[in-house]
Image (cartoon, rainbow, N blue to C red):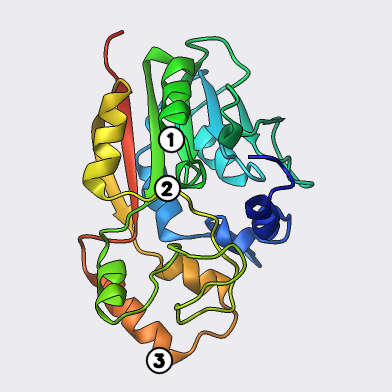
Amino acid sequence: MHPDSPAQFANSDRWSADDDAWRGYKHGPNGLVLEDRIKQTLALVLPKPNGALLDVGCATGVVTRLMAERAGIGRFLGVDFVKAPNAQIEVHPVNLDANESLPFPDASFDLVTCLETIEHVHDTDHLIDELHRVLKPDGYAVLSVPRIDGLLTVAMLALGMQPPAIECSLRRRYGAPDAGTRVSGHVSHFTRRAFAELLEAHGFRVDAFAQASIYSSWLLATPHPRLSTRLPLWVLSRIPFKQDVQIVRVLPRPR
């Protein structure tokens, strides 16, 4: 996708330096406040002492550092469509939606992470191939995407509403209760089964699965949430299955 295309322009705010509330964390008076999806992601990170980590879709690198610290990684860097002005890590600009390759040799990293980035790419097969290519045979990857078979999506469809992050416009969230918020820019959508099949088709096997509700994400990003919206989201977030974000730890099958 060209950098000046309507889709990229419509989502420019999502890459802005002051949009941290949608990145999985928020800066609070006592340090970082993490969303549930980041906590669940960190729980899947295994030790790789002195290894190398690549975070694809790294944004500012704040979450990259948290994952590196948990894994005991010695070297970590990231790639993203643009380099955030306040990036805390080494970032290589790569347009994955234009089928660019990751600028690294085969089998370069012990841990590869890609959090809520795959859904922004049209050719997901190319991206998963690239993640597999740069991962060492004895390494692992932690990946996450929204799921369209979550209870919130099913409930909203039943009520005739447009579900979160499934949009019909690059300008406005038509048909959604929060139509005035920014569009997500998601172009690929996954059920749990579809995501697993995509990964398996490109040489991965799922080693662990977790999920998270968007409730904590929405709370961090909404200054004064209304009770009428907060209550049903909270109820759905308490149900321990079919939540909104799926997170997997995957291992490469022998080449």
Q: Of circles 1 and 3, which is in front?
A: 1
Residue 188 - label: 2
Number of other residues with Cα within 10 Å of mark 3, as a class: few under 14, some 14 to 19, many 20 or more: few
Three-letter code, disc 3: Ser
The residue at 46%/25% (across/down) is: 131
Residue 186 - label: none
Which tag, 1 or 2, sits closer to the chain's start? 1
The residue at 41%/85% (across/down) is: 229
Q: Nearer the viewer, residue 65 or 248?
A: 248
Query: In whole angstroms, how far apart are the C-alphas of marks 1 and 3?
Result: 37 Å
Residue highlighted by disc 1 = 124
Instruction: Please state the horizontal and vertical placement of residue 91, each as a whole percent of the image.
Output: 70, 32
Instruction: Please state the horizontal and vertical placement of residue 155, each as a whole percent of the image.
Output: 26, 75
The residue at 35%/77% (across/down) is: 233
Three-letter code, disc 1: Thr
Number of other residues with Cα within 10 Å of mark 1, as a class: few under 14, some 14 to 19, many 20 or more: many
Marks 2 and 3 in Cβ contact (< 8 Å): no
Taking the image as shown, residue 92 lies to the left or right of residue 145, namely right
Residue highlighted by disc 3 = 228
Looking at the image, is 136 positioned above or below residue 119? above
The quarter in which the N terminus is drawn is: top right
The residue at 41%/20% (across/down) is: 132
Three-letter code, disc 2: Ser
The quarter in which the C terminus is drawn is: top left
Query: In terms of secondary structure, where does tag 3 sit?
Result: helix
